Amino acid sequence: MNGTTIYQDPSILNILETKFYNDTEKFVEAIKEMFQIKNRLERQEYNLLKAYDRGELSIGQIGTILNLSKYEVMELLEKYDIPFIRVDEAYIEHEFNAFK
């Protein structure tokens, strides 16, 4: 594998040369490991959000676990298309009765 033909971006070439001493195999392994870590974090994130969806965790609890603000957790809910508020018949009736 020739790093100069595969990696055209100057910043990537700089990292390859200075941090990996042109060892493309170690460089590729480091990138694979980075993506594996990212995938594990996204799975954890998703599992926590599904627990919220099932009513098992609150937004605050997820924020604490992931070290995120409540707003950031709500953005994640949107990213994964998980509703922030569940509106069912009982909720609507409760809200409607509040105005009586």
Image (cartoon, rainbow, N blue to C red):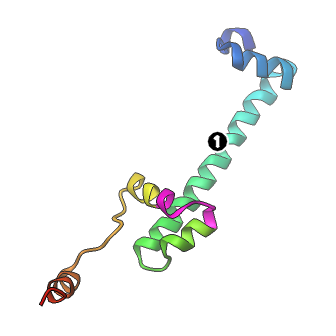
Q: Residue furthest front?
A: 99
Quadrant for residue 82, please give it: bottom left
Was residue 71 drawn as part of the magenta stretch in this picture? yes
Q: How many marks?
A: 1
Q: Which residues are magenta?
A: 65-73
How far across and how far down the image is residue 62, in percent? 55, 69
Q: Secondary structure at mark 1?
A: helix
How far across and how far down the image is residue 33, in percent? 72, 42
Quadrant for residue 20, please give it: top right
Quarter of the image that includes the C terminus? bottom left
Q: Is residue 35 above or below residue 51?
A: above
Left or right placement of residue 25 versus residue 82 in this view: right
How far across and how far down the image is residue 13, in percent? 74, 15
Q: Residue at x 63, y 61 (%)?
A: 67
**Residue identified by numbered label 1:** 35
Q: Main secondary structure of the magenta part?
A: helix
Label 1 neighbour load within 10 Å: few <14, some 14-19, many 20+: few
Q: Nearer the viewer, residue 31 or 68?
A: 68
Q: Is residue 31 above or below residue 42?
A: above
Amino acid type for the residue under numbered disc 1: Phe
Q: Is residue 31 above or below residue 99?
A: above
Quadrant for residue 11, please give it: top right
Q: Nearer the viewer, residue 8 or 23?
A: 8
Q: Residue at x 20, y 83 (%)?
A: 95
Q: Nearer the viewer, residue 17 or 83?
A: 83
How far across and how far down the image is residue 58, in percent? 49, 75
Q: Residue furthest left?
A: 100
Q: Residue at x 60, y 49 (%)?
A: 39
Left or right placement of residue 86 versus residue 66 in this view: left
Left or right placement of residue 90 versus residue 54 in this view: left
Q: Residue furthest top?
A: 5
Quarter of the image that includes the N terminus? top right
